[in-house]
Amino acid sequence: MQEPGPNPNHGGPSAEGAPINEAEAIARLKQTDDPSAQYYAAWWLGRMRSEHPEAVPLLCEALRQRQPRQPDAGVEANAVARNAARALGLLRAKAAVADLLATLEDDDHGLRDVAARALGDIQAPEAVTALCRRLSTGLQGAGAPEAGSPRLREPCESLLEALGAIGDNTPEVLKVITPFTEHPRPLIRSAACRALLQLTGESCWATPLEELLRHPQLQVRRAALMDLGAVGWRPALPAIEATLAENSLKLIALRGLAEHPREPDASECLDRDGDPLVIVLDAMDALL
Amino acid sequence: MKTSLTVNDSPSLTLESAITQLEQASSAEDLIGATRRLAALAEPGAADSLMSVLGFNNPGAALAAVDGLIAIGPEAVPVILGNLDARNYGARAWAVRALAGLADERGLDVLVDALLHDVGPSVRRAAARGLGELVLSQQPDLAAAQLNSCVDALEMGSRDGEWVVRYAVVVGLERRMRPQVKPDLRERITKTLKLLVDPQHESVLVVRQRAELSMQRLDVVKH
């Protein structure tokens, strides 16, 4: 799901964080004595969609600050690296693809997670091979639970979502993704179906997502909402309206249906009369 | 005769027992069920209890309570206004949503304040919608002043940092633009909508799409 693009001129009550300017953010990222100042600066540059010429090089530098994962040390630097990766994704920084691909090979699960997401945000076709390779061991490898942790061995959700966002729908890619539609965890199934729906536009991948909108766990219904929104799957409108979740999340999902619609062949379209965009907007009005 | 007595008596009995059930609810699930049953009565006598549910930090129950307060109608308004809890943010947010749904002119000041100052985007969003739907006074002078306050607040809300609030502002402005609206206000509303369709000014596509739809609809009213 694309993040709402805030306009720095919109100083509404929700403006987050201390009001610093771009020069200050660049300066804070450049120094290395205070990782928490770098952490905030990296977030700020992404959030504000900075176009400063030094932003991307400095964020890449921050990404290279990452350290081998140790229980007691190196956490700060990796926190900066995580925010830097997120910011590079938000900035759609093609120049950062090589650094992000290197980060995708890091031992730190959290860093691989944000690197995969950023590569998806950038829609980097160069990343497809590496993303597929990390997933290619399937449910018994990448998708197996990591010992002593609630996580899976690979950040499967982010890897799958990135493949969906990049848009390479060659059979090899589809073959890597498809097993994950049978994963025991519903959030992984949701991410896999989302990617396949984006890549193929075939309704058969929308059906499991609509079923997840009726899952007993709210967290799962929320994920399915975000995934259908990310695809922009307009035939899911009635299922989105009917799911039990916060209106705020339904509105975010419907924004996707309005802004970047996808639908199957005309015969399967919404059976309501009228302009399909207006139907989506009317549904949003009813949720305000 | 006997039947009609039963029918007349049963609501108050039910109200009492529904309130008792609510007070005795011992789990989050119980509370949601009890609130739904009380809300379904749409009885003014339930308003105080429904208001108290808003402060329990149980979203399912609060949602049911908001629906119940709206179903009660105008008689719920003084109860809500008299029990606004400035210190309990969550409760206040739900109360604003109830006031937005009730569309009663007595809620105007609270809705304006919420749109301009509330920290929660969902509350500002509901307030913007409420300002669009508010039923104005029967007295023409008062109604004109109220309409002005609504449009003032919506204009300011059009600069909100959250897209969903700006989206709700568009909807609010569209609903304020009735055929009888005076030319100066009409011009102000149009001016704000024009900013919200302009990609130079508004970065979020769905807000522009909605503003565009409003402009189309309002042109139909104009000609």
Image (cartoon, grey):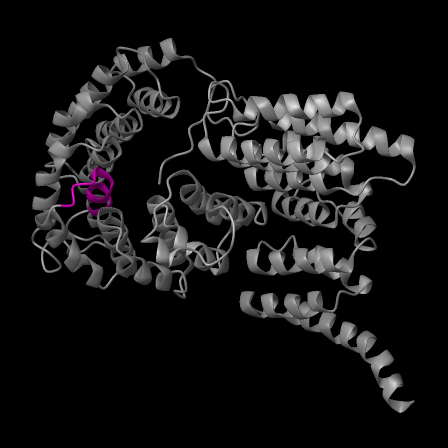
Identify which residue is drawn at 14% across, 34% down. A125
Residue B210 seen in render: yes
Check residue A138 for magenta coloring. no
Q: Identify the image quadrant of residue A213.
A: bottom left
Q: Is residue A144 visible?
A: no
Question: Is A163 one of the magenta-colored residues?
Answer: yes
Residue A148, x across and y down, in percent: 18, 56
* Residue projecting furthest to the bottom: B2
- Left or right? Give the position of B38 relative to A266: right
Q: Is residue B208 left or right of residue B80?
A: left
Q: Position of residue A199 (x, y in %)?
A: 22, 47
Give the residue at x 49% y 24%. B202
The front one of A114 and A92 is A92
Q: Position of residue B48 (x, y in %)?
A: 77, 58
What residue do we see at 70% from left, 31% from top?
A: B223
At x 19% / y 25%, what residue is drawn? A63
| Residue A276 at x, y percent in the picture | 47, 47
Q: In this figure, what is the number of numbered marks?
A: 0
Q: Quadrant of residue B34?
A: bottom right
- In this view, the residue in front, B150 or B140, is B140
Relative height, residue B54 to residue B158 (above, below) = below
Question: Which of the pair A146/B181 is nearer the observer?
Answer: B181
Q: Which residues are magenta?
A: A160-169
On the rendered image, what quadrant is the N terminus of chain B found in? bottom right
Quarter-of-image position of residue B203 = top left
In the displayed structure, B75 sits above or below B38; it is above
Position of B186 relative to A268 (above/below): above
Q: Please tell me whether the stretch drawn in magenta is mainly helix, strand or loop.
A: helix
| A188 lies left or right of A209 | left
